Image (cartoon, grey):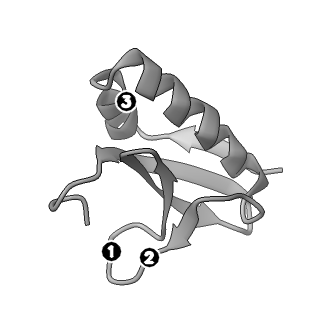
């Protein structure tokens, strides 16, 4: 099982989101503890983060260190033309 670490930036972004969306993002982010065996995750190319988790209209960007089994959540953004 992986450990989840939320960056300061991602927590700040999460606080700005409505409560219902925030709860959905938090709940689905918990599935990353079983990464890579989780749904709605895509490996990214030419992006500063390795992966993204899709949660409704939001994207949770994260990096994974398989050696120490840590998923570091870096950003939470609403999907629009500037997300990627």
* Residue 14 marker: 3
- How many numbered discs sit on the rendered protein? 3
Horizontal and vertical percent for residue 4?
Answer: 64, 43
Horizontal placement of 5 versus 60: left or right?
Answer: right
Residue at (83% x, 50% y) in the render: 1
Which of these two is toward me, 24 or 66? Answer: 24
Asked if the residue under mark 2 is in contact with the one under mark 3, i.e. CB atoms within 8 Å, the reply is: no
Q: Quadrant of residue 12?
A: top left
Horizontal placement of 39 versus 76: left or right?
Answer: right
Task: Kindly report the distance in space between the C-alpha atoms of the residues bearing marks 1 and 3.
Answer: 21 Å
Horizontal and vertical percent for residue 65?
Answer: 63, 65
* Residue 44 marker: 2
Q: Quadrant of residue 36?
A: bottom right
The residue indicated by pointer 1 is 47
Q: Quadrant of residue 26?
A: top right
* Residue 39 marker: none
Task: Kindly report the distance in space between the C-alpha atoms of the residues bearing marks 3 and 2.
Answer: 21 Å
Residue at (43% x, 28% y) in the render: 21
Asked if the residue under mark 2 is in contact with the one under mark 1, i.e. CB atoms within 8 Å, the reply is: yes
In the orientation shown, which residue stands out farthest toward the top? 19
């Amino acid at each position: 099982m992986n450990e989840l670490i939320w960056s300061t930036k991602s927590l700040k972004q999460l606080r700005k989101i409505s409560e219902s969306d925030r709860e959905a993002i938090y709940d689905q982010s918990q599935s990353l503890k079983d990464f890579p065996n989780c749904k709605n995750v895509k490996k990214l190319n030419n992006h500063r983060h390795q992966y993204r988790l899709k949660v409704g209209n939001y994207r949770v960007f994260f990096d994974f260190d398989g050696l120490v089994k840590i998923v570091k959540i870096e950003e939470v953004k609403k999907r629009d033309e500037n997300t990627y």
